[in-house]
């Protein structure tokens, strides 16, 4: 018998305390314990990228982080980032460019693109493509997603100038 | 996934004590490989010792002008570190050639050295595999072996070591610092990983109760003439069929000193000093590079599906050395091979 481990973490700015089995991964914890179902689960092997969340500010694969490892850390999900307005330009560009169909990969795509633009505000298409290479999309063929990130980058640059 | 105990020591000595006390325990840092192996039941640890918060996250200059990289420095931080970008761009490039942004954010420097093979049979617990279950046989030798080794194979195992970062570290002649119950020791990078021989269950020469604390780079970083070329089935997010790290010190049109390491072809980063020696003092041209390639690949042996790697490696070596000599390293974003 393995006793649950107490953890305390910040999720989208709110402190959360819970008892979890060590084997529970962060995405399951967010979805099952906290009801934050915007973070999706695809392959659960670190390949598809659908489970992307931010851990202490950096995007990670939620399926390859144990919830106990997030103890004391700050987690941000699509729910928190969307509510904060941080993704406004990206979300508008994804909508305008039809950069999603089923939407399953979209929350993770937005988080990944957001990290790229924070690091590099004016990426070229090859750089966008490379940065998103760990996020699978089975609907769009990616072109529209690359377009949307490019447009969002321009929108952000324009808003700042 | 099976359940397991979880512990999080705050000091290196405590982590070493804990691993020594439980032979079925495993260290976890970034977890990008270990958790995946646990989900496939390849690894079934009784306990995970979370070392991710040990104080091994700094990158510091050493007195001799080299660099000491803490074992827990994430791959992303290392690739973007100003001293790595400026003095060891070969290392930055190799890191960016591997995995995806999310994984590079999680994965640690030491953990990269500990990556296990992606041989399909190693991952499939329904099939024999000497690496996973010693003595059970190798399914790859007569099976699907397109991704497998062409150099240094044995009758027990033809798996390849999958890292990109380590290929650059091999070329740069890094040193690995490890800590065990008896104290600290260092290993030359070339001595860290092993060939499979008849003990393929051992990937490297780290003892079960030891922990990697740092990687050290010597002062010579070959920042002017280097390239990391990775040939793979997809342009991104795939393991190498063949990869080449080349680093040159030039003397006008001639090669003064050469380093050459290959990934995707063996159970460890493949480096042949005779090939490097053959380049020294030679003109930097295709004839010299081809000769070095032939020395590296002498003894290469293909299997049913991977014999193409021999010629692919030969051409990749020539191309990468040409890129290095010209000072035009392979771009890891545009991916166009020039």
Image (cartoon, rainbow, N blue to C red):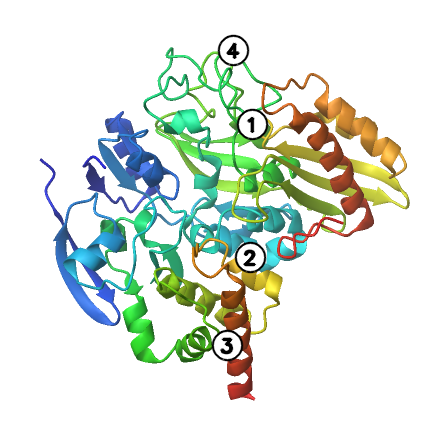
The x and y percentages for residue A41 are: 30, 53
Q: Work out whether disc 4 and disc 1 sit on a shared chain.
A: yes
Front disc: 2 or 1:
1
The x and y percentages for residue B239 are: 53, 39
Helix, strand or loop for disc 2: helix
Within 10 Å of disc 4 (Cα), the crowding (few <14, some 14-19, many 20+) is: few
The x and y percentages for residue B228 are: 66, 44
Task: From the viewer's side, name the closer residue of B119 and B32.
Answer: B119
Count the numbered circles shown.
Answer: 4
Q: Quadrant of residue A126?
A: bottom right
Give the vertical position of B328 relative to A45 (above or below): below
Q: Left or right: B42 with respect to B277?
A: left
The x and y percentages for residue B76 are: 50, 55
Task: From the viewer's side, name the closer residue of B75 and A52.
Answer: A52
Residue B146's tag is: 1
Instruction: Quote the CA–CA distance across marks 1 and 3.
Output: 41 Å
Q: Chain of mark 4?
A: B
Helix, strand or loop for disc 3: helix
Residue for badge 2: A130
């Amino acid at each position: 018998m393995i006793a649950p481990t107490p953890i305390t973490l910040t999720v989208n700015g709110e402190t959360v305390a819970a008892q979890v089995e060590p084997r529970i991964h962060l995405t399951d914890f967010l979805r099952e314990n906290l009801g934050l179902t915007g973070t999706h689960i695809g392959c659960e092997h670190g390949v598809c990228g659908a489970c992307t969340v931010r851990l202490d500010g950096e995007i990670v694969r939620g399926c390859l982080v144990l919830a106990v490892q997030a103890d004391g850390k700050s987690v941000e999900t699509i729910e928190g980032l969307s509510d904060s307005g941080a993704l406004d330009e990206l979300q508008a560009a994804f909508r305008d460019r039809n950069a999603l169909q089923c939407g399953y990969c979209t929350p993770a795509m937005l988080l990944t693109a957001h990290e790229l633009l924070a690091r590099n505000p004016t990426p070229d298409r090859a750089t966008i493509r490379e940065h998103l290479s760990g996020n699978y999309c089975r609907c769009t063929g990616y072109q529209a997603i690359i377009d949307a990130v490019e447009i969002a980058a321009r929108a952000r640059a324009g808003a700042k100038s | 996934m099976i359940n397991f105990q979880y512990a999080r020591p705050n000091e290196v000595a405590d982590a070493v004590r804990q691993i020594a006390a439980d032979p079925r325990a495993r260290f976890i840092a970034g977890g990008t490989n270990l958790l995946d192996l646990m989900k496939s039941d390849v690894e079934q640890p009784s306990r995970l010792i979370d070392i991710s918060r040990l104080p091994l996250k700094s990158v510091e200059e050493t007195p001799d002008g080299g660099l000491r990289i803490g074992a827990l420095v994430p791959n992303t931080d290392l690739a973007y570190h100003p001293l790595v970008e400026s003095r060891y761009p070969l290392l930055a490039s190799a890191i960016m050639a591997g995995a995806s942004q999310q994984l590079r954010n999680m994965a640690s420097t030491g953990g990269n050295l500990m990556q296990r093979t992606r041989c399909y049979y190693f991952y499939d617990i329904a099939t024999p595999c000497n690496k996973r279950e010693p003595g059970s046989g190798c399914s790859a030798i007569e099976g699907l072996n397109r991704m497998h080794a062409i150099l240094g194979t044995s009758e027990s195992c033809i798996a390849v070591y999958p890292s990109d970062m380590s290929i650059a570290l091999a070329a740069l002649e890094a040193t690995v610092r490890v800590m065990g119950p008896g104290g600290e020791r260092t290993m030359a990078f070339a001595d860290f990983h092993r060939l499979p021989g008849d003990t393929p269950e051992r990937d490297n020469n780290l003892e079960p109760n030891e922990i990697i604390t740092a990687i050290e780079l010597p002062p010579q970083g070959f920042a002017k003439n280097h390239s990391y070329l990775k040939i793979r089935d997809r342009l991104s997010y795939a393991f190498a069929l063949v990869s080449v790290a080349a680093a040159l010190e030039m003397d006008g049109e001639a090669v003064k000193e050469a380093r050459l390491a290959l990934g995707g072809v063996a159970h460890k980063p493949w480096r042949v000093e005779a090939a490097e020696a053959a380049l020294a003092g030679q003109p930097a041209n295709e004839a010299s590079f081809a000769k070095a390639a032939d020395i590296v690949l002498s003894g290469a042996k293909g299997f049913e599906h991977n014999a193409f790697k021999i010629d692919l490696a030969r051409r990749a070596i020539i191309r990468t050395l040409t890129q290095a000599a010209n000072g035009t390293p392979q771009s890891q974003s545009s991916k166009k091979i020039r």
